[in-house]
Image (tube, rainbow, N blue to C red):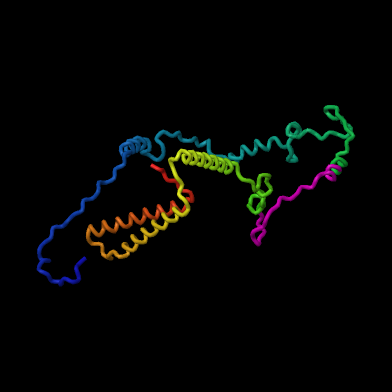
Amino acid sequence: MRDMSAPVENIYNLIPKEEIRVPKPPRYTSTFRDSVKVEEQKNKASHKTMGPAKVEVPSPKEYLQKHTHEATLAQKSAFLDSTGRAPRFLAEDRKRPPVPTRTEQPIMGVQTNKSFLKTNVAEAVMAVPKKPLPVYVDTKKGDKHLLETSGLVPKYTKRKDYGSTPEYLAKRNEEVRRAQEEYDEYVRERLRMGAMKQLSEAERENVLEGLRKNWDELHHEYQGLSVVIDTPLKKAHKERLEAEMRQLERDIDVIERHKMIYIANN
């Protein structure tokens, strides 16, 4: 495509340019080419004339006669009589056995006076009517679905163990209670030996007040830092203040969650 910004007449256009030819890809050659050639030459030699070379010429006396193709139809109609029905000796083999007459006895010799009509009526009267399955309709066209599998029936509230504590929760609560008893026994034993002492409520409040005061001082100092932290010294000072504040927050949370605190005497 010619550049529209360049003028039509340009001295560089007078320099002949070498034509760049794109090489074509190799031509596709089938792998069955040789076998196809051999097969074509083999079958071509026997059909150089009109039709196969060795064909027996039909005799003029054996020409196609009239009704030649109707031979099968004629053979089939040979078994029918003048009325178009099959002969008796052929029809007997194809017939079903005749219906037994009223006077014939059953084959097994079993007879009964049972009235099937009355029996069916009695069974229909005494039968329990079939209860329809509970369904629900969710569209205006009347699409029905089973109510039991829909989740709308509170069937779990009718269970015998409904509302009771599950077995695994009772087992876990028992383990927690046993562990707490063992810990309390250990603490009492250590207190009797004089290895630990328990902080009173006043001492606990004093410790909390001191931790909160220290946190307020660090927070005040942290708020006074410069906005731009451009030196390694300022960055290290800021990181130190953040670490100390996080540690104080953890200590305050531990003391607030535990009412009884023990301190070793040593």
Residue situated in front as seen by the camera: 13 or 61: 13
Prevalent SS, magenta region: loop
* Residue occupying image coordinates x 41% and y 43%: 264
Q: Is residue 255 magenta?
A: no
Q: Is residue 194 above or below residue 148?
A: above
Residue 191, position as x, y percentages in the image: 47, 41
Residue situated in front as seen by the camera: 141 or 7: 141
Name the quadrant of the C terminus: top left
Residue 109, position as x, y percentages in the image: 85, 27
Q: Which residues are magenta?
A: 122-144
Q: Tell me if 24 is positioned left or right of 156 in this view.
A: left
Residue at the extreme top of the image, as rendered: 108
* Residue occupying image coordinates x 48% and y 35%: 58
Q: Tell me if 53 is positioned left or right of 167 in this view.
A: left
Q: Tell me if 104 is positioned left or right of 145 in this view.
A: right
Residue situated in front as seen by the camera: 142 or 79: 142
Name the quadrant of the N terminus: bottom left
Q: Tell me if 202 is positioned left or right of 79 in this view.
A: left
Q: Is residue 133 magenta?
A: yes
